[in-house]
Image (cartoon, rainbow, N blue to C red):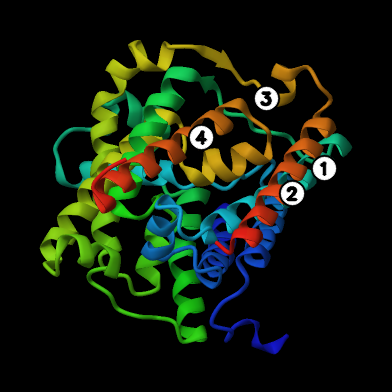
């Protein structure tokens, strides 16, 4: 059942990424060069819908959150390293596989590189665990925890910011 | 309605909003059927794939590596999710008539020429750097970006900002020759 659910969810997600044109190298790098906001429109629309639905269902007790540990050193250094690789490859982990599916055969090299990068990280992990992964470990905290506001106020602000950003894209035709 | 399969593309706002609905449904359905919430994510699968390959081709048992031990190398929900992304993109591209074999993307070709081996090397190197960074950060744009942000996690917010900063600066340097 677990594997079937994963497959179905992945097929629908891959379908939507492809129809939204998010998988294309030109859209990924086009965003990083700030010429084309397609991938940001997709991603923040998903966040907009998701943040409301997830918190509503969490308030009802239907689902639990699964917050990842905030470790400032890890997310800052790892995030910046990720960004460097993303710009060179033109794909992130999810989109590389989808891009290969829509015929971008060169994405296969990115996929193989990602597997190699994962193996390299597995070797580096004992060192990272003693260093970067201890730098600024704040645990499973959320934005509402930090700003000491009700989560729905934070969500309202986020929604307004995202909609203002979309409006700015429209006004600037990007 | 019948042409939802054959349309060549959706408005990215619509496609993204539907992905948001999918992310919510995934958590609800997995909570009901698997008794654990499945938030979308992709990068751990590459660790499991690396572990499986090492197990197959080297004599080292996996349990000598702490990270593989911690990650639990097996076919799981997320690995099938990633395989599903491939299949879903293929179905969508073929049905919509947008499937196209490509060895070198045009932007890359303009900057680095038409040698497919150069693109292969760039894609491999970039992929390796990206995944190393994603695992160090604890997630990729799916796990930290989508799932983290929709839970309002601090880890997701910091990672997302750093993904964008690192990516934008690097893209300017390599495709435009300067910040």
- Label 3: how many Cα within 10 Å (few below 14, some 14–19, many 20+): many
Is residue B45 visible in this depiction of the protein? Answer: yes
Q: CA distance from mark 3 to mark 2?
A: 21 Å
Numbered disc 3: secondary structure = loop
* Residue A57: mark: 1
The reply to whether residue B49 is visible in this rendering is no
SS assignment at label 4: helix
The chain letter for the residue carrying disc 3 is A
Left or right, A5 with respect to A94, comes to right
Of callouts 1 and 3, which one flags the residue occurring earlier in the amino acid sequence? 1
Kindly identify the residue that appears in the image at 75 percent across and 48 percent down. Answer: B32
Q: How far apart, in angstroms, are the residues tagged by discs 2 and 1?
A: 8 Å
Do tag 4 and tag 1 residues touch (Cβ < 8 Å)?
Answer: no
Label number found at residue A142: 3
Q: Nearer the viewer, mark 4 or mark 3?
A: 4
| Residue pictured at 29% horizontal, 52% vertical | A89
Whole-number angstrom distance, CA of label 4 to CA of label 3: 15 Å
Q: Which residue is mark 4?
A: B161
A49 sits to left or right of A39:
right
B166 lies left or right of B38: left
Marks 2, 4: nearer the viewer: 4
Q: Mark 1 packing: few (<14 Cα in 10 Å), some, or many (20+)?
A: some
Q: Are marks 1 and 3 in contact (CB under 8 Å)?
A: no
Q: Residue at x 74, y 49 (%)?
A: B28
**How far apart are the alpha carbons under marks 1 and 3?**
17 Å
Q: Which residue is mark 2?
A: B28
- Please provide percent x and percent y for residue A103: 34, 74
Which quadrant is home to the N terminus of chain B? bottom right
- Residue B107: percent from left, percent from top: 29, 65
């Amino acid at each position: 059942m677990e594997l079937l659910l994963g497959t179905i969810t992945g097929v629908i997600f891959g379908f939507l990424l492809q129809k939204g044109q998010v998988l294309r190298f030109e859209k990924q790098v086009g965003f990083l060069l700030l010429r084309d906001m397609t991938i940001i429109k997709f991603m923040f629309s998903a966040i907009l819908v998701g943040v409301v639905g997830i918190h509503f269902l969490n308030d009802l007790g239907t689902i639990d959150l699964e917050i990842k540990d905030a470790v400032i050193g890890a997310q800052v250094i790892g995030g910046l390293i990720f960004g460097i690789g993303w710009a060179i490859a033109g794909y992130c982990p999810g989109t590389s596989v989808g891009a290969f599916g829509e015929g971008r055969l060169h994405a296969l090299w990115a996929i193989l590189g990602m597997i190699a990068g994962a193996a390299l990280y597995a070797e580096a992990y004992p060192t990272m665990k003693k260093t970067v992964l201890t730098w600024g470990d704040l645990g499973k905290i959320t934005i509402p925890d930090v700003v000491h506001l009700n989560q729905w106020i934070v969500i309202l602000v986020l929604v307004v910011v995202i909609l203002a950003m979309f409006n700015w894209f429209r006004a600037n035709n990007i | 309605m019948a042409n939802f399969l054959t349309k060549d593309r959706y408005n990215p706002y619509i496609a993204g909003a539907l992905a948001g609905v999918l992310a919510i449904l995934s958590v609800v359905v997995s909570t009901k059927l698997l008794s654990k919430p499945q938030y979308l994510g992709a990068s751990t699968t590459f660790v499991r794939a690396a572990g499986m390959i090492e197990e197959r081709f080297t004599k080292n048992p996996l349990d000598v590596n702490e990270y593989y031990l911690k990650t639990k190398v097996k076919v799981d929900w997320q690995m099938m999710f990633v395989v599903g992304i491939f299949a879903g993109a293929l179905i969508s591209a073929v049905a919509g008539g947008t499937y196209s074999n490509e060895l070198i993307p045009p932007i890359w070709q303009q900057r680095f020429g038409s040698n497919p081996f150069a693109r292969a090397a760039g894609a491999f190197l970039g992929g390796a750097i990206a995944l190393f960074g994603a695992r160090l950060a604890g997630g990729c744009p799916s796990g930290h970006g989508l799932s983290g942000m929709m839970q309002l996690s601090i880890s997701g917010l910091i990672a997302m900002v750093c993904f964008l900063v690192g990516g934008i600066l690097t893209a300017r340097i390599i495709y435009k020759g300067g910040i």
